[in-house]
Image (tube, helix red, strand yellow):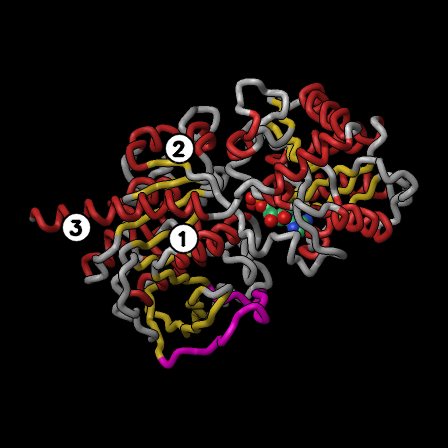
Amino acid sequence: LTSSPTRAGLHIIHIAAEMAPVAKVGGLGDVVTGLGKALQRKGHLVEIVLPKYDCMQYERIRDLRALDVVVESYFDGRLFKNKVWVGIVEGLPVYFIEPHHPGNFFWRGEVYGEHDDFKRFSFFSRAALELLLQAGKKPDIIHCHDWQTSFVAPLYWDLYAPKGLNSARICFTCHNFEYQGSAPASDLTSCGLDVHQLNRPDRMQDNLAHDRVNPVKGAIVFSNIVTTVSPTYAQEVQTAEGGRGLHVTLNSHSKKFVGILNGIDTDAWNPATDTLLKVQYNANDLQGKAENKEALKKLLRLSSADVKQPLVGCITRLVPQKGVHLIRHAIYRTMELGGQFVLLGSSPVPHIQREFEDIANHFQNHEHARLLLKYDEALSHLIYAASDMFIIPSIFEPCGLTQMIAMRYGSIPIARKTGGLNDSVFDIDDNTIPTQFRNGFTFLTPDEQGLNGALDRALGHYVNSQSWQQLVQKVMRIDLSWDSSALQYEELYEKSVARARATATRN
Ligand code: ADP
């Protein structure tokens, strides 16, 4: 196995189910790569452990090779062999675990959504720790993410610290408390955790169903550091309305719980170098933005007759969390107000997908609206660049990346004041916010009137092209990189490591 070089910084290992761009489903994948790169730039040794999926973008992995070792890992009372691969993704060293189990756990053509997700990912969590143990790694921080790798926390303290993998503090980040992975308590045995010890109210027992265990709760209880992806969302999930049953657990562990706003990967999302655009541009030269708008209109057969007509963009998973009824309303309202609208989105929920297919058909040949119901990375770049405004009317939003990407490309966000949107979008007309931070249009009430209040104002402002251009330039210059967020993670890690060392010295 590759050995860990000596270094001055911390040794941080992320164990995750996603990593952009090779295995990305949503924001989690962006965070693992963005945070990892930022911490690496600060001089830390950062490594990632991922499942080896069949559906990865293999062409984005550099120097992929199988290691000359086999890691045996426990599952359902037996040991199974795992082949371990290593490669470089975006400059970060990544270990890929390929289980040799007849269930072909990660050979399913997709990352999530299988009937045995609980078993597949608890298996992976254990195999990842087994790899670290057998490789003789001595990480300072093991950072796990979301319910799929939350098993790492109890597995570490119950099984792996006693085996000698005991150098680390555990950090757990929950990217969305909607997904907790709870399952019948007996399912926990397959990865070797002790159900009788863990199915207790103060440990992993689900707060809403006592015959079930809740992996996210387990990680909250057993990690040294617990984070979520924005300060406002951290507050929301500590209330009965926002906590999805976990607010009580979060409240009793509130000392170690903090919200840190995500950044975006400003290398990957950079209009000045983005080769997926028709023309590159920057805040000092917005002509290129106008050319991208023309190019998108041509590509999508939208009317180019009026260069002053505002274009509203929306790129999203079409799920209830994202405020689908408000997105639908925004399409019609934009049209009423004389704007154009482009939606790029796809839905895992059949009735929502059908509803939007009907709307897409309705606008099939319309001059001012186009709905594209698919996932398309390349097209997403063009829409960020081409649009003047970007709509995110989420019902709840742990952090949200699209408002930040939109800003980087000079598309002004129109957002509901919730979660990370509340921490990153500040209303142009809000006198309580210092002028230099005001960067978009916001609304609070999640209904059509609420949304109109922000959308109508945005389109009203757009008419004054000089002040709109100044706003675009200001928004494009905001620092949305990972630097300041990575600094906060670094401080948390360092404090936790220092506390552990102080305790070890005292004993
Ligand atoms: P979530 O993780 O809840 O889906 P985020 O705003 O945190 O939402 O992250 C969404 C990411 O996925 C962004 O990078 C966005 O550009 C991308 N995305 C969402 N839907 C699509 C789509 N249909 N096509 C291309 N990219 C998409």
Disc 1 crowd rating (10 Å Cα; few below 14, some 14-19, many 20+) is many
Q: With 136 as the anchor, is 150 left or right in this view?
A: right
Q: Quadrant of the N terminus?
A: bottom left
Tag 2 residue: 246
Would the CB of label 1 be found within 8 Å of ligand 1? no
Whether residue 282 is visible, yes or no, is yes
Tag 1 residue: 149
The CA span between labels 1 and 3 is: 26 Å
Q: Which residues are magenta?
A: 51-68
Question: Which of label 1 and label 3 is nearer to you?
Answer: 3
Q: Amino acid at mark 2?
A: Leu
Q: With 6 as the anchor, is 117 left or right in this view?
A: right
Cβ atoms under marks 1 and 3 closer than 8 Å: no
The CA span between labels 1 and 2 is: 18 Å
Where on the picture, by quarter, is residue 138? Answer: bottom left
Whether residue 182 is visible, yes or no, is no
